[in-house]
Amino acid sequence: MPNIQTISPIDGSLYFSGEQHRLSDIEKALKLARPAFQEWAGLPLTERIKYVSGFVDAIEKDKNEIALEITWQMGRPLSQSPWEINGFVERARYMISIAEEALSPYKPEEKTGFKRWIEHEPLGVVTVLSPWNYPYLTSVNAIVPALVAGNAVILKHSFQTPLVAERYLKAARTAGLPEGVFQILHLSHENTAALISNPAIDGVFFTGSVEAGVAIQKSLNNKFIPCGLELGGKDPAYVRADADLDYAVNNLVDGSFFNSGQSCCGIERIYVYENLYDRFVDGFVNLTNQYVLGNPLDPGTNIGPMVKASAAGFVRRQIEDAIAQGAKALINESLFKASEKGTPYLAPQVLINVNHTMEVMTEESFGPVVGIMKVSDDQEAVRLMNDSRYGLTASIWTEDDIMARNLGRQIETGTVFMNRCDYLDPALAWTGVKNTGRGITLSGLGYQHVTHAKSFHLRTKK
């Protein structure tokens, strides 16, 4: 079996090498997981919470080492990587804090002669399949509630960020989780399909591309189990006539280019009311030109390389195709000295004179490029925001929360933001519509996705 080879986008060096797991390893993991699940699910919720809290504490304790590993594996500036562990801790502790309420039995109104209630039972042995772009923030959404609810978890992480899985395993051992309750497997695509299609797997939670989501779904064609799919996005922003212009510019530049644009809920297209358009574009370009592209280990860098040269090449092609169709690029790439074709280093780019015949405005870029269009009113903005096969988040920049609420109800999306973007609130459901996928993580509703309902209907004969 070939090695896992993680090539760092920083300098093209081999950062990690390890062995992939085989089909025999999958069988061993599943054989261990089933009895571990039964023991784990039988523990009181308070006991599971103590274990999982220790698991989270162990990750937080190693935050500085983990931040450096994140940067080397996927290229995010080291000045920003610790933020991911802070977010991991925030989400994990919130989900732990609401577990008792979220998992408590539901009791309908009393009925003479009967005792009735609904319990939330763990699914069993579940698989979490996580990507590289936010390796802790994407995985925590499923891992922590799944464990707290009583499931056994098998984690398969991206080959770009395999040390994340290893860190999780170390934390599980430090926290003393019973053997088999949390396991990791480094698997090829073929063996991942073999794992999730195995009858012993009771649930799958995946974050990644639409194409990979379709492959996951096909692997489950012969079984009926819960499958959460958080897939692509092409998240829009609308800057209304009454927006605080400077505030909108500052936040939308960050929302577009943080993590080199490699965010599922990053801003990829912006619609601006016509009377603000010119000033907004000028401010957006001026701020973008202040970004520093370079080695992410340098504390002065605030935009690092993309994860791979091929990913940067994909975004370059989108930009070039748009320009060929009449778009205008406003950022002089030569000002960003590290930007170079054939490497993962790509300057941020701002495009105007764009429209929805261009791929850069309709298909996920997952890189540091954003298109900006002028709109004449709210109705045009909503129509364009909805003109997408994706629907993860949408943001409205306005001083009128009533209008934001009204417009938000018309937008086909999982989350509506006002004066904010590119953020997950653990108290709210993280979900999407259309090709963004299905299922829910975070909030109390997230626990429903890692459990199944069992009704108790007892007749007392009184």
Image (cartoon, helix red, strand yellow):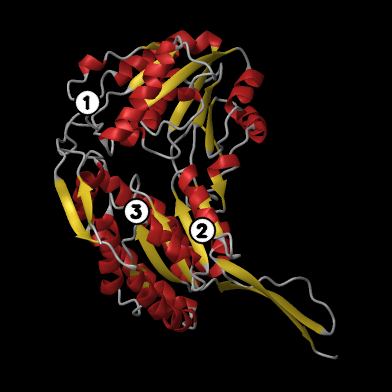
Taking the spot 30% from the left edge, 66% from the top edge, the residue there is 21
Name the residue type under label 3: Tyr
Location of residue 206 in the rendering, given as x and y in whole percent from the top left corner: 46, 54
Measure how far apart labels 1 and 2 are at the Cα level: 43 Å
> Could you say which disc has been placed on residue 292 in the image?
1
Kindly tell me whether residue 181 is visible in this rendering. no
Above or below: residue 365 compared with residue 98? above
Foreground pick, 427 / 297 = 297
* Residue tagged 2: 219
2 or 3: tag closer to the N-terminus: 3
Near mark 1 (Cα within 10 A), the count class, few <14, some 14-19 or many ≥20, is some
In the rendered image, which residue does mark 3 sit on?
136
Between 18 and 154, which is closer to the camera in this rendering? 18
Quadrant of the drawing holding the C terminus: bottom right
Graded by Cα atoms within 10 Å as few (under 14), some (14 to 19) or many (20 or more), the crowding at tag 2 reads some
Is 391 left, or right, of 285 in this rendering?
Answer: right
Is residue 64 in view from this perspective?
A: yes
In the rendered structure, which disc, 3 or 1, sits on the residue that comes first in sequence? Answer: 3
For numbered disc 3, what is the local secondary structure? loop
